[in-house]
Protein backbone atom coordinates (compact mmCIF):
# COMPACT_ATOMS: atom_id res chain seq x y z
CA UNK A 1 0.00 0.00 0.00
CA UNK A 2 1.20 3.49 -0.83
CA UNK A 3 1.84 6.08 1.79
CA UNK A 4 -0.44 9.10 2.04
CA UNK A 5 2.28 11.45 0.74
CA UNK A 6 2.84 9.27 -2.33
CA UNK A 7 -0.84 9.18 -3.23
CA UNK A 8 -1.14 12.93 -2.61
CA UNK A 9 1.82 13.37 -4.98
CA UNK A 10 0.03 11.33 -7.67
CA UNK A 11 -3.13 13.37 -7.16
CA UNK A 12 -1.23 16.66 -7.33
CA UNK A 13 0.63 15.63 -10.50
CA UNK A 14 -2.63 14.53 -12.08
CA UNK A 15 -4.26 17.83 -11.09
CA UNK A 16 -1.49 19.95 -12.58
CA UNK A 17 -1.50 17.97 -15.82
CA UNK A 18 -5.21 17.37 -16.35
CA UNK A 19 -7.34 19.99 -14.58
CA UNK A 20 -8.09 22.22 -17.60
CA UNK A 21 -8.70 19.25 -19.87
CA UNK A 22 -11.07 17.64 -17.38
CA UNK A 23 -13.01 20.88 -16.89
CA UNK A 24 -13.55 21.10 -20.64
CA UNK A 25 -14.48 17.41 -20.79
CA UNK A 26 -17.12 17.79 -18.06
CA UNK A 27 -18.38 21.13 -19.33
CA UNK A 28 -20.79 19.47 -21.75
CA UNK A 29 -22.32 16.81 -19.52
CA UNK A 30 -22.64 19.22 -16.61
CA UNK A 31 -24.15 22.06 -18.62
CA UNK A 32 -21.52 24.76 -18.12
CA UNK A 33 -17.87 25.46 -17.52
CA UNK A 34 -18.70 26.53 -13.96
CA UNK A 35 -20.38 23.21 -13.24
CA UNK A 36 -17.46 21.39 -14.88
CA UNK A 37 -15.03 23.18 -12.56
CA UNK A 38 -17.17 22.33 -9.53
CA UNK A 39 -17.25 18.66 -10.51
CA UNK A 40 -13.50 18.40 -11.15
CA UNK A 41 -12.63 20.25 -7.94
CA UNK A 42 -14.96 18.01 -5.95
CA UNK A 43 -13.37 14.93 -7.55
CA UNK A 44 -9.88 16.01 -6.47
CA UNK A 45 -11.18 16.76 -2.98
CA UNK A 46 -12.71 13.29 -2.78
CA UNK A 47 -9.53 11.73 -4.11
CA UNK A 48 -7.60 13.39 -1.28
CA UNK A 49 -10.23 12.29 1.24
CA UNK A 50 -10.42 8.68 0.08
CA UNK A 51 -6.78 8.27 -0.89
CA UNK A 52 -6.52 5.06 1.10
CA UNK A 53 -8.97 3.32 -1.24
CA UNK A 54 -6.45 3.61 -4.09
CA UNK A 55 -4.84 0.26 -4.83
CA UNK A 56 -1.34 0.46 -6.33
CA UNK A 57 -2.13 -2.55 -8.51
CA UNK A 58 -4.91 -0.62 -10.22
CA UNK A 59 -4.60 2.20 -12.70
CA UNK A 60 -4.78 5.67 -11.10
CA UNK A 61 -6.67 7.12 -14.06
CA UNK A 62 -9.41 4.49 -13.80
CA UNK A 63 -9.72 5.03 -10.05
CA UNK A 64 -9.93 8.79 -10.50
CA UNK A 65 -12.34 8.48 -13.46
CA UNK A 66 -14.76 6.59 -11.24
CA UNK A 67 -14.58 9.43 -8.71
CA UNK A 68 -15.23 11.99 -11.49
CA UNK A 69 -18.27 10.12 -12.78
CA UNK A 70 -19.66 9.86 -9.25
CA UNK A 71 -19.16 13.61 -8.76
CA UNK A 72 -21.01 14.29 -12.03
CA UNK A 73 -23.89 12.06 -10.96
CA UNK A 74 -24.05 13.76 -7.57
CA UNK A 75 -24.01 17.22 -9.15
CA UNK A 76 -26.83 16.35 -11.56
CA UNK A 77 -28.86 14.81 -8.74
CA UNK A 78 -28.30 17.84 -6.48
CA UNK A 79 -29.30 20.28 -9.21
CA UNK A 80 -32.43 18.29 -10.07
CA UNK A 81 -33.48 18.23 -6.44
CA UNK A 82 -33.18 22.00 -6.33
CA UNK A 83 -35.04 22.31 -9.64
CA UNK A 84 -32.26 23.99 -11.54
CA UNK A 85 -29.34 22.83 -13.65
CA UNK A 86 -27.31 25.82 -14.73
CA UNK A 87 -26.17 25.76 -18.37
CA UNK A 88 -23.79 28.19 -20.06
CA UNK A 89 -26.80 29.96 -21.57
CA UNK A 90 -28.36 30.34 -18.14
CA UNK A 91 -25.10 31.59 -16.63
CA UNK A 92 -25.12 34.26 -19.32
CA UNK A 93 -28.70 35.06 -18.28
CA UNK A 94 -27.27 36.59 -15.13
CA UNK A 95 -25.91 39.23 -17.48
CA UNK A 96 -28.50 39.44 -20.30
CA UNK A 97 -27.56 40.74 -23.69
CA UNK A 98 -27.88 44.47 -23.92
CA UNK A 99 -31.12 45.53 -25.54
CA UNK A 100 -31.07 47.92 -28.42
CA UNK A 101 -31.46 51.35 -26.79
CA UNK A 102 -34.38 52.13 -29.06
CA UNK A 103 -36.46 49.22 -27.84
CA UNK A 104 -35.53 49.22 -24.17
CA UNK A 105 -38.22 51.83 -23.54
CA UNK A 106 -40.77 49.67 -25.36
CA UNK A 107 -39.77 46.59 -23.36
CA UNK A 108 -40.25 48.50 -20.11
CA UNK A 109 -43.69 49.66 -21.28
CA UNK A 110 -44.70 46.09 -22.11
CA UNK A 111 -43.49 44.95 -18.70
CA UNK A 112 -45.53 47.70 -16.99
CA UNK A 113 -48.65 46.39 -18.73
CA UNK A 114 -48.18 42.99 -17.06
CA UNK A 115 -49.75 42.12 -13.70
CA UNK A 116 -47.67 43.46 -10.81
CA UNK A 117 -46.26 40.08 -9.78
CA UNK A 118 -45.19 39.28 -13.37
CA UNK A 119 -43.75 42.77 -13.92
CA UNK A 120 -41.69 42.42 -10.74
CA UNK A 121 -40.24 39.08 -11.92
CA UNK A 122 -39.47 40.44 -15.39
CA UNK A 123 -37.80 43.58 -14.03
CA UNK A 124 -35.65 41.52 -11.67
CA UNK A 125 -34.64 39.22 -14.48
CA UNK A 126 -34.07 41.59 -17.39
CA UNK A 127 -32.94 44.77 -15.69
CA UNK A 128 -31.65 43.85 -12.22
CA UNK A 129 -29.91 40.81 -13.75
CA UNK A 130 -31.13 38.30 -11.19
CA UNK A 131 -30.96 34.62 -12.06
CA UNK A 132 -34.23 32.73 -12.06
CA UNK A 133 -33.22 30.72 -9.01
CA UNK A 134 -32.52 33.97 -7.13
CA UNK A 135 -35.91 35.37 -8.11
CA UNK A 136 -37.56 32.23 -6.73
CA UNK A 137 -36.16 33.15 -3.33
CA UNK A 138 -37.78 36.60 -3.49
CA UNK A 139 -41.27 35.86 -4.78
CA UNK A 140 -43.96 33.36 -3.83
CA UNK A 141 -43.79 31.75 -7.30
CA UNK A 142 -42.09 28.43 -7.98
CA UNK A 143 -38.85 28.32 -9.91
CA UNK A 144 -40.55 26.49 -12.78
CA UNK A 145 -43.28 29.13 -12.93
CA UNK A 146 -40.68 31.91 -13.05
CA UNK A 147 -38.85 30.25 -15.93
CA UNK A 148 -42.17 29.75 -17.73
CA UNK A 149 -43.11 33.42 -17.19
CA UNK A 150 -39.80 34.58 -18.64
CA UNK A 151 -40.07 32.14 -21.54
CA UNK A 152 -43.57 33.39 -22.40
CA UNK A 153 -42.47 37.00 -22.18
CA UNK A 154 -39.53 36.36 -24.49
CA UNK A 155 -41.91 34.73 -26.97
CA UNK A 156 -44.10 37.85 -26.80
CA UNK A 157 -41.10 40.09 -27.44
CA UNK A 158 -39.95 37.96 -30.37
CA UNK A 159 -43.39 38.28 -31.98
CA UNK A 160 -43.70 41.97 -31.24
CA UNK A 161 -40.25 42.94 -32.46
CA UNK A 162 -39.88 40.08 -34.93
CA UNK A 163 -36.38 39.45 -33.60
CA UNK A 164 -34.32 36.67 -32.17
CA UNK A 165 -32.69 39.08 -29.71
CA UNK A 166 -34.69 37.65 -26.82
CA UNK A 167 -33.79 33.98 -27.22
Image: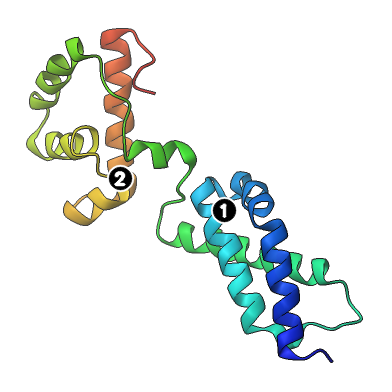
Q: Looking at the picture, does residue 96 appear above or below residue 117?
A: above
Q: Is residue 112 left or right of residue 78?
A: left
Q: Looking at the picture, does residue 132 appear above or below residue 114?
A: below
Q: Residue 23's x, y, as percent?
A: 62, 52
* Residue identified by numbered label 2: 132
Of the 4 image quadrants, the one containing the C terminus is top left
Q: Residue 160's x, y, as percent?
A: 26, 10
- Number of disc labels: 2
Specify few, some or many for label 2: CA neighbours under 10 Å numbering under 14, 14-19, or 20 or more: many
Which residue: 9% across, 19% down? 109
Q: Looking at the picture, does residue 134 appear above or below residue 78?
A: above
* Residue identified by numbered label 1: 36
Q: Quadrant of residue 106?
A: top left
Which residue: 47% across, 57% down? 80
- Residue extending furthest right? 57
Q: Which mark is residue 164?
A: none
Q: Is residue 163 left or right of residue 128?
A: right
Q: Nearer the viewer, residue 86 or 13?
A: 13
Label 1–label 2 contact, CB within 8 A: no
Amino acid sequence: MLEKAEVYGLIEDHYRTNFDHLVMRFRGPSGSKHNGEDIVQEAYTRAMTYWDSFNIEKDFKKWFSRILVNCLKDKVKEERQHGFFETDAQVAEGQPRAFNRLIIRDVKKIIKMQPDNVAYILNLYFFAQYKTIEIADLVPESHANIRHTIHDFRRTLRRKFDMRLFE
